[in-house]
Amino acid sequence: MKRISRRNFLKVAGVGAAALGLAACGGSKSGSTATSGTASSAAGSSTGSVNTAGFTVQYGPNPETLDPSLNSAVDGANTIITIFEPLLIINENNEVIGGQAESWEASEDGLTWTFTMRDGLKWSDGTDLTAKDFEYTFKRMVNPDTAAPYAETCLGMIDGFDAAQAGDTDALNVKASDDGKTLTIVLSYPCSYFDKMAAFASMSPVQQATVEANGDAWCTSAETFVSNGPYMITEWTPSERIVLTKNPNYVGGWDSSKIVSDSITLLLLEDSSASYAAYNSGEAVLIKDVPTDEIPSLTKAEDGGDFYVDTILGTYYVSLNLQRDAFKDAKVRKALALAIDRDYVGNTIMQGTYSAASNLVGPGIVDEQGYFYDNANGGSPYIADDYEANMAEAKKLLEEAGYPNGEGFPTIEYSTNDSGYHVPLAEYLQQTWGDLGITLSISKMEWSAFTAARRAGEYDVARNGWVMDYNDPSNMIEQFCTDNGNNDGKYSNPDFDAAMEASKVADPAEHFAQLHKAEDILMEDMGCIPVAYYNDFWLQSSSLKGVWHSPYGYWYFQYGYIEE
């Protein structure tokens, strides 16, 4: 296994360079600043006639949820950023700009953030939207009854968070002015990337009236769905399509003169063959789920074709359900991790579209001294690149754990959704863990059922992954804190939790030192098994213009249109 190639590293190097000095909780306050990512536009300026009727794309199956506070999937977020708008947004130049807030400022000590709302804000149903809607949303999100997976990530730095999570939601120090014009948020410690957090999809507002009238069903049909973005849902046929129509009541940060397409249709397909057929027939002008067996025949965009591969800041990993007795021993977990030939996975199974992962936090993510990845573990990978030696060590560890040649180890099940490389990887793990004497069965599930089961802990082993929401390593690492809503493996180590808590300081050096310590502990425990560093790959027609792709795995369709 080799480290990520220089070519791919350089694609994300600019991402980290732009974020140096801005990534830590603590440090100077932020105003309107460049984000820690570099958007990759796959569309040029228009040279022909513009068709504003609309276009059709595919980037995922039926979403598990489109409630911004409950979503934790990239495909859901891709829709949410089109139909909702948070306080701030990330524009096509990778800058944080005003969204529903026209301006914002942080106090000198970095603790008090004040957002001034735009005039004339409306929900898609035409009713007024004010700062009070954001206060309601954030207090709903922190409510333990909501069980929002991103609550700690998004709101954990706000004063009163712990008391709010314990049930006193009014303790969260978020307050709208009586006239609804300003929103004041008081933090418990300085967080220099809080402006980027305010632009995160999960921080989008939800309308209290429709939530209370319809309960959890408010976000499951077009009839009850109320949003505030440039597009709104007007048709939803589950597992078939969602139709987004331009929102006539939209007021916000996107340039309305550039929002020209009347509609955007989302094909809800998980079968890559069906997606590919839709693309080849001309029904869809962009698809994310490309059949892997077709990749060798596709021409890359850099060579004049329509196949795009773009680095994103994320890691594909395997979750072990640590509530299962089979995985209580760290020696077992390490044995399973060492038995994976990551070069083979990245270059053969994933056909070079992903890169071998030896650490949890991958390239492009910064720390005070440069790149977190380079400075982790004393500059050495956590998982060495000698596969034969790794396999020998895996067998030794399994024997030390009481399972010589796998004898006595229970049969385990690998859960995954059936798209992309997920099943081929599962079949490879079935073979390589079989070489340890471990029997692995495979359970293929529909996407929304799979994610729900994984979050509920109803699995033995499951494919998993994380794409960064902002360029600070805490975003990748904190999901393994004991009480984090995204801790699907139920990993728990008091020393790890203590290091993560100690990272919440204003001193960048101490912040990153504690994050390195936390990753050291996690990888020593093998609390998850890193496999590969993500790239996004997709097919896109040259007729689709005005859209762009970010290093956080998002497509921005707000300005999209068809050129004829």
Image (spheres, rainbow, N blue to C red):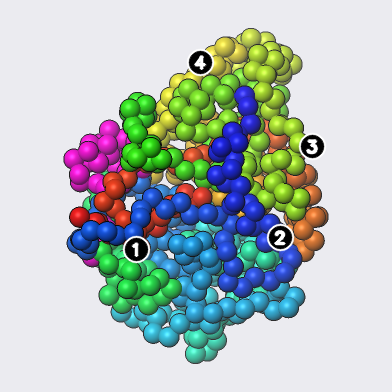
Pick whichever, 27 or 189, lies toward us. 27
Pick whichever, 461 or 215, lies toward us. 461
Q: Nearer the viewer, mark 3 or mark 1?
A: 1
Secondary structure beneath dot 1 equals: loop
Label 2, label 1: how many angstroms apart (C-alpha)? 31 Å
Label 3, label 4: how many angstroms apart (C-alpha)? 33 Å
Residue under the point 55% across and 55% down: 37
Queried whether the magenta region covers residue 508, the answer comes back as no
Q: Earlier in the sequence, mark 2 or mark 1?
A: 2
- Identify residue type, mark 4: Gln
Q: Which residue is mark 4?
A: 431
Residue under the point 47% across and 33% down: 353
* Picture mark count: 4
Q: Residue 169 placed where, x, y %?
A: 59, 70
Q: Which residue is mark 1?
A: 559
Secondary structure beneath dot 4 equals: helix
